[in-house]
Image (tube, coloured by chain):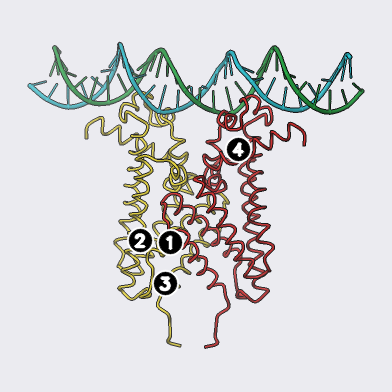
Chain colours: A red, B yellow, C cyan, D green
DNA sequence: TAATAGTACGACCGATCGTGCTTTTTTGTC
DNA sequence: GACAAAAAAGCACGATCGGTCGTACTATTA
């Protein structure tokens, strides 16, 4: 890796951490330069605009998310186990960021960008739709495996799945409720229970 | 009402609208002054600090929320009807703001303030806890009326209720999914169905 | 070794931020 | 209508923002 690519990666590493705390808007070039140990203009040269920097940070975050959440979950056996694996690793991602006193960058970005337009917003939307579609696919597989009901709206499932993450983030970050973990787990179990085939055996 | 109080109220009216679009951080004194038709310093004199202004805006928003969401719902008969009324008016609040291309100020504030400290954050947290407690109380009444199961965690109910609002806001604002309404309604019906007493009549 | 491209620096730009100080205009009371 | 008080405006400040500039050092390549 060339010198330039090395420091660029180092900058993006600091940028991801910093942006997780302050969001995309709060991320200033001056502060990032201070954190990374570069001059403002030295850092700026790597990206040539703030928007380019933001896009690069978003893609860094996406890489980490794929690596830390999506890929591990895809190793679990298809069907309900994989759906559960998604939940565990996804929540663990959120939990880790809450514990570090920074938040989930994607949730922060969603709130900052929801009324803007431009490439940053479009990319974020595309990624989120992709992940929700991936979740829906995992749920469809659970239907095929017979773990979930045949009449089952997997998109609705993905929608509600994400609502659990959002509520957990809100409850633990803003309200600082120590029972957020338990709450999220119970909500998830209820979602799974309703997805299972009806039991007529008794 | 004295002249001062009149213009102060007018300023807060514009401030609420503006802050709903840009959040508490994006709300600048210069822009607000432009919107309200005052000079920066003329407006500033009414509040003497930005933090005071923000607190006043938050309290304005709380008044509107109580008036538009909480009070109407409390007029519905206790039990499930009142719970449903909460859902309808709460979602209508969110829906209205989404349609206006601004967002729910409380959700925006939650994301901006979740890692800050100071009176603004504390007030927001207090209000949100209050509303969730109010919701839990409404659910408890539904238990008393026999509409909901006896073994029933009303705090969990309030938690999941709010997750529906959060997901709706995210889905309609960021993803611009036209089916957000339908999704939220279905999620709510599932929440209610699970809260009802088990039916052993067949 | 010489030429070139990549990397980083400090100084600086115009714009905007919140906020203080001073002056002018408006309001309410006798 | 005079006059004090309140309200609004005018102006300026220091800080910070994203971004540009010329310049110097350091790799890479010829």
Mark closer to the chain start, 2 or 1: 2
Picture coordinates of residue B6 (x, y %)?
Answer: 27, 34
Q: Chain of mark 2?
A: B
Tell if the residue under mark 1 belongs to the same chain as the one under mark 3. yes
Q: In the rendered image, which residue does mark 1 sit on?
A: B161
Q: Are marks 2 and 4 in contact (CB under 8 Å)?
A: no
Alpha-carbon distance for marks 4 and 1? Answer: 35 Å
Determine whether, in the image, residue B169 is placed left or right of residue B5.
right
Picture coordinates of residue C17 (x, y %)?
Answer: 45, 28
Say if A162 sits above or below C21 in the image.
Answer: below
Q: In the rendered image, which residue does mark 3 sit on?
A: B195
Alpha-carbon distance for marks 1 and 3? Answer: 12 Å
Q: Are marks 2 and 1 in contact (CB under 8 Å)?
A: yes
Picture coordinates of residue A137 (x, y %)?
Answer: 66, 64
Picture coordinates of residue B3 (x, y %)?
Answer: 25, 30
Q: Residues within 10 Å of mark 4 (few under 14, many from 20)?
A: many
Nearer-the-camera pick, B82 or A60 = A60
Alpha-carbon distance for marks 3 and 2? Answer: 14 Å
Q: Are marks 1 and 3 in contact (CB under 8 Å)?
A: no
Tell if the residue under mark 4 belongs to the same chain as the one under mark 1. no
User: SS of the residue at dot 3?
Assistant: helix
Disc number at residue A15?
Answer: 4
User: SS of the residue at dot 4?
Assistant: helix
Q: Residues within 10 Å of mark 2 (few under 14, many from 20)?
A: many
Residue at 65% x, 28% y is A44
Determine whether, in the image, residue D25 is placed left or right of residue B85.
right
**Of marks 3 and 4, the one in the foreground:** 4
Q: In the rendered image, which residue does mark 2 sit on?
A: B135
Q: Residues within 10 Å of mark 1 (few under 14, many from 20)?
A: many
Tell if the residue under mark 3 belongs to the same chain as the one under mark 4. no
């Amino acid at each position: 890796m060339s010198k330039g690519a090395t420091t660029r990666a180092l900058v993006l590493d600091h940028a991801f951490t910093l942006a997780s705390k302050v969001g995309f808007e709060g991320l200033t070039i001056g502060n990032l330069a201070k954190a990374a140990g570069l001059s403002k203009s030295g850092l700026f040269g790597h990206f040539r605009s703030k928007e380019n920097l933001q896009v690069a940070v978003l893609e860094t975050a996406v890489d980490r998310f794929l690596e830390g959440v999506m890929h591990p979950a895809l190793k679990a056996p298809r069907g309900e186990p994989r759906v559960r694996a998604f939940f565990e690793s996804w929540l663990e991602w959120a939990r880790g960021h809450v514990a570090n006193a920074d938040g989930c960058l994607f949730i922060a970005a969603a709130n900052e960008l929801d009324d803007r337009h431009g490439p940053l917003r479009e990319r974020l939307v595309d990624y989120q739709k992709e992940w929700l579609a991936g979740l829906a696919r995992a749920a469809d597989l659970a239907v095929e495996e017979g773990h979930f009901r045949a009449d089952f709206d997997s998109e609705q499932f993905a929608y509600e799945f994400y609502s659990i993450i959002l509520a957990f983030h809100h409850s633990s970050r803003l309200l600082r409720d120590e029972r957020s973990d338990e709450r999220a787990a119970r909500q998830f179990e209820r979602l799974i229970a309703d997805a299972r085939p009806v039991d007529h055996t008794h």
